Amino acid sequence: MLSGDVVAVWEVELSDGVHRVEFAHGTTTGKRVVCVNGQEVIRKDWMFKLVGKETFTVGSAQTRATIAIEAVSGFAYEYTLEIGGKSLQKFIDSRAETTKTWLLKVDGEDCRVVLEKDTMDVWCNGQKMDTTGEFVDDGTETHFMVGEHDCCIKATSSGRKKSGIVHSLLLDGEKTAASTQ
């Protein structure tokens, strides 16, 4: 695991879950260690160049991630994380546009359901779900099961151009209000 040289920790929210990225940088030895969800993915023990980039993947979709190490002054360094070629903030903003996430309890268990709006893929607790889509009078419905429960994501027009399509999650026919995005 990582020692006392941890200089940055990020939480990266992907469709298959929230991933923790930790970066350790030994500024005297040049050591670089990257861990994703507690698993070491990069270790370089002696490096003479203290600045640069480390690239690795995150999540089941193998999303490309890069940590940039830059000197800001003297022996101070700045660490930035890029996901899919975008700064973490731009990536988060982009995901807010292209995904919808609900956090809810099903049979006493926490569930995280993610809809990828561009592909209509649905994920539940890191597993891509088998879905069935159908057109209905007021939009579309995407059906899937969580355990023994019928789930449905309804996509309906908001009636307003700016907000476009509204996505709602129904669990056993009841609308869930536990939306995070």
Image: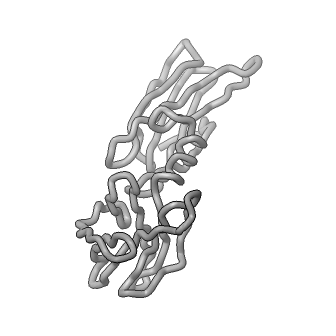
Q: Position of residue 127 (x, y in %)?
A: 30, 62
Q: Is residue 141 above or below residue 92?
A: below
Residue drawn at the location 48% of the way across and 69% of the way down: 102
24 and 71: which is toward the camera: 71
38 and 99: which is toward the camera: 99
| Quadrant holding the C terminus | bottom right
Q: Is residue 166 above or below residue 40?
A: below
Residue drawn at the location 31% of the way across and 84% of the way down: 149
Q: Position of residue 95 (x, y in %)?
A: 50, 50
Q: Position of residue 33 (x, y in %)?
A: 49, 33
Q: Position of residue 158 (x, y in %)?
A: 52, 68
Residue drawn at the location 33% of the way across and 72% of the way down: 141
Q: Is residue 156 above or below residue 33?
A: below
Residue drawn at the location 63% of the way across and 37% of the way down: 7
- Determine which quarter of the picture holds residue 27: top right
Name the image colouring. Answer: one colour
Q: Is residue 1 above or below residue 106?
A: above
Residue 10 horizontal side relative to residue 107, left or right: right
Residue 61 horizontal side relative to residue 69, left or right: left
